[in-house]
Image: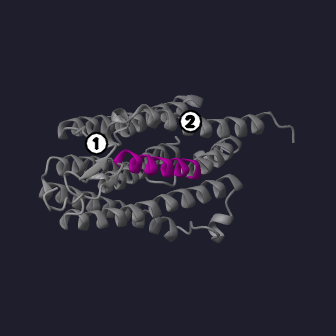
Amino acid sequence: MNGTIEVQAVPLHRDDEGSRMGMWLFLFTELILFGGMFIIYAVYRFSHPAEFHLAAQELDTSVGMINTIILLTSSMTMAMAITAIQKKDKILSMALVSATLVLAFAFLVNKFFEWSTKFSHGIYPGSTELMGKPPGEVLYFGLYFVMTGLHALHVMIGMGLLAVNLAFIKRGIVTWDKSVKLETAGLYWHLVDLIWIFLFPLFYLIH
Amino acid sequence: MHENIGKTEHIVEYKTYAYIWMALITFTGVTVIAAGMNLGNWTVFVALAIASIKGLMVMNVFMHLKFEDKVFKIFAMVAFAILMIFLGGTMNDFITIRW
């Protein structure tokens, strides 16, 4: 063609919907992971209703409620961070991801003090105080520590994902046009919130 | 040049999220109040019903399930159904077993 060279741009394959589907499929395995523990909870609560009731009195409902509000709010700021980046507001998006991180940290601080209080009362896995209690209460606290502990681990992993995405937004790797990394991190974060929505009434609200 | 199959076109407004947040906080209050009332054996079912409503709001709006392709919803329902089969089977066995 008249001696000119036609440069063909290499098509960059991208499938945002596929990326989100991948995250959803992973979240289903998380559902089964926590679901297994909810099933154990259901069986033992059914077989030891009175002891579960008694053991739950040890937990502070207001701490649980504050943490619920913190996580629900962090879920909102996370969702808004995606809206912000899609509306090309990079600064607001970074502010909202940072707010989510601060709330996540506040959740963990609360959890730390909550567990510390339990420990100072001699209630921790394998303690002589706990082992002296009836079997149902031992089961309740075993499930409490494992389930809220695994949940807290998810909060920490989520914070790592959010921190990485904060850097991605700053460096222009995540932009209004390429926001799927932030979207999938968001999906993970909402799952952490979703699990807490069920943990809260099942551990703190047995009256 | 991009070849992008599933680009998100749907942008959810800030106020939609704010409304959902308000509803979630309200339901948290409701579940705490409901737990304080003497509902006997219904306590756990009321708590789970409220948690499910909250969960659906989080999934549909925060997680954009409402705006996704139908296949996402089918997958989510299948995953939930599998969990319910596990739970139902285990509880049925546990309740009816003769030790």
Q: Write the residue at 45% across / 66% down.
A: A117
Question: How many marks are shown on the rendered structure?
Answer: 2
Q: Is A143 positioned to the left or the right of A17 in the image?
A: right
Q: Write the residue at 31% across / 52% down.
A: A180
Q: Write the residue at 38% across / 64% down.
A: A108
Label 1 to label 2: alpha-carbon separation: 24 Å
Q: Write the residue at 23% across / 38% down.
A: B12
Q: Position of residue A194 (x, y in %)?
A: 43, 46
Q: Which of the two residues, A141 or B79, is positioned nearer the viewer here? A: B79
Does the magenta-highlighted stretch encompass residue A46? no
Mark 2: amino acid: Val
Question: Residue tagged by mark 1?
Answer: B8
| Magenta: main secondary structure | helix
Closer to the observer: label 1 or label 2? Answer: 1
Question: Residue tagged by mark 2?
Answer: B78
Crowding near pointer 1: few (<14 within 10 Å), some, many (20+)?
some
Residue A61 appears in the picture as rendered = no
Mark 1: amino acid: Thr
Q: Is A154 positioned to the left or the right of B1 in the image?
A: right
Q: Position of residue A207 (x, y in %)?
A: 52, 40
Find the magenta span and give its range.
Answer: A16-33
Which numbered disc covers residue A61? Answer: none
Q: Which of the two residues, A109 or B78, is positioned nearer the viewer here? A: B78
**Earlier residue among tags 1 and 2:** 1
Does the magenta-highlighted stretch encompass residue A32? yes
Question: Farthest residue toward the front?
Answer: A2
Q: Position of residue B64 (x, y in %)?
A: 34, 39
Q: Is disc 2 placed on a helix, strand or loop?
A: helix
Q: Is disc 1 placed on a helix, strand or loop?
A: loop
Q: Position of residue B35 (x, y in %)?
A: 46, 36
